[in-house]
Amino acid sequence: MSITTTELWRMSAMDLAEAIRSGQTSSQEVIEAHLGRIEAVNASVNAVTVVLGEQALEAAKGADRAVAGGADLPPLHGVPFTVKGNIDLVGTPTTMGLKALAGAYPTLDAPVVERLKAAGAIPIGRTNLATIAVRWHCESELWGTTVNPWDRSRTPGASSGGEAAAIATGMSPLGLGNDGLGSLRWPAQCCGVSALKPTLGRIPDATSAGPAEVAIGVQLTAVQGPMARRGPEPARPVRVALVVDPAGQGTANQVQDGVRKAARALDDAGYVIDEVEPPSIDVAAATLLAMLNTPDIRAMWQMSSQMLPADTQRFPSAFYEVAGDPDPVTTVQSFMTRQSLLRAWGEFQEEHPLIVAPIFTDVPFEVGTDLGDGRVAETIRGMRMALAVSALGLPAVALPVGTGDGLPQSVQVIGPRYREDLCLDAAAALEDRLGIITPIDPR
């Protein structure tokens, strides 16, 4: 049975791997299908910044020879993937969206890239990001703005917005991004795809093109993770805490409706649903701001601000206006508060291992509004559950559960530390019942 080119770019990474392994298609056909899709739609969304066509096709031919020779095949043999512009991929510059880094070629692959290659996957391109991964809207000094394929007037999210848009439109079945302030989960919500924010420390993180020294607050929040359209099969059900309006600060009806859709689907799958929330969500979110509001981080921004575009400068200025003046006592206290919150959430998750909650409590904002007066503060408030999860280094899967008012509805499924398996099981149960809403044609 042959598979058409259109079917190939619509398939998930695992389905493509199985089709290649079984001989239903070849890696070369898969790569060609995705290169064709990039050529057809990337001009409309500006998600893929560098296309590795020749290299990917050569790698695909080698992958097909291995299949023909009966070799033992790794799990993602011959499957294409894309890489965010701040993750090292040998042979391409790690630009971070900056013109000044257009020639910053790494000497080694990042660990996440190395691992995907070892699993048989083939890099097919680089994707756009917010300049130096700052802002919740995907606009880079070097590559320009990425478009939300659902609605051109709305943000695609950031900073991994290029990855999300590429996957949502079928240009890539699998991508690599990172998350500190919601940079995997927020674009997943905006573009209707899935993302895994792993437990802090679960996936190694290193770079040969970036700074060797990173502030402790950043070390305790930033993680590397994958984006795709679906995950593995579900295992056993567990008790779930349903959080419709985190900390009671207001959540849009469109978002609440999506959270309740997820609850009904998990109930149908046999999960036990309780509408209850973990302790001190607002405190955890505020703790993250304090952890990132240290004198050294503030000094770094002041030193680097002159080389950054004006909009990128405006974001940290507004961010730190919300955080307030840095105070050494507050900083030290924030790390102590984080530890007490970890204990409190750990006790909560003994009874409710999974938490289902919004990512951002409103719909994607309109393009050009994210830096308006008071808007960064408003977005921080809306991202309170995402920030709380980042502060505590917990794993979370972001995934769509349907559409409302023409835009994706998404939730995050949050697990205990090092229990990504529980998150993925529940996400698969949701996907089985609510379906996949991408790929789509840009609108």
Image: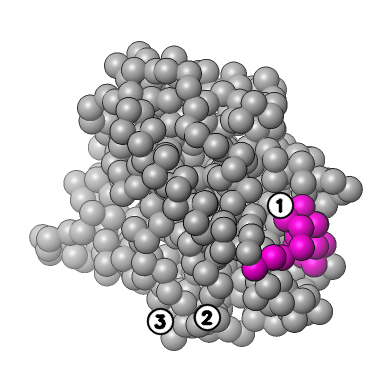
User: Along the line of sight, which residue is nearer the eye, 216 or 55?
Assistant: 216
State the image coordinates of residue 333 (x, y, percent, origin top left): 57, 58
Gap between marks 3 and 2, in whole Å? 18 Å
Is residue 325 found left or right of 42 in the rendered image? right
Q: Is residue 32 above or below residue 377?
A: below
Q: Quadrant of residue 381?
A: top right
Marks 1 and 3 sit apart, C-alpha to C-alpha, by 29 Å
Label 3 Cα neighbours within 10 Å, binned few <14 / some 14-19 / many ≥20: some
Any mark on residue 137, and which? 1
Query: Which element carries disc 1, helix, strand or loop?
Result: loop
Q: Residues within 10 Å of mark 2 (few under 14, many from 20)?
A: few
The amino acid type, in three-letter code, at marker 1 is His
**Image quadrant where residue 201 sits:** bottom left
Q: Nearer the viewer, residue 78 or 181?
A: 181
In this picture, which residue range is highlighted in magenta? 312-328
Disc sitting over residue 213 in the figure:
2
- The answer to whether residue 36 shows anywhere in this view is no
Q: Nearer the viewer, mark 2 or mark 1?
A: 2
The answer to which of marks 1 and 3 sits earlier in the sequence is 3
The Cα atoms of the two marked residues, 2 and 1, are separated by 26 Å
Q: Disc 3 vs disc 2: Cβ atoms closer than 8 Å?
A: no
Q: Which quarter of the image is occupied by the N terminus?
A: top left
Seen in the image, is 409 located left or right of residue 363? left
**Three-letter code for the amino acid on which mark 3 is drawn:** Leu
Q: Earlier in the sequence, mark 3 or mark 2?
A: 3
Residue at 21% x, 66% y is: 65
**Amino acid at the residue labelled 2:** Glu
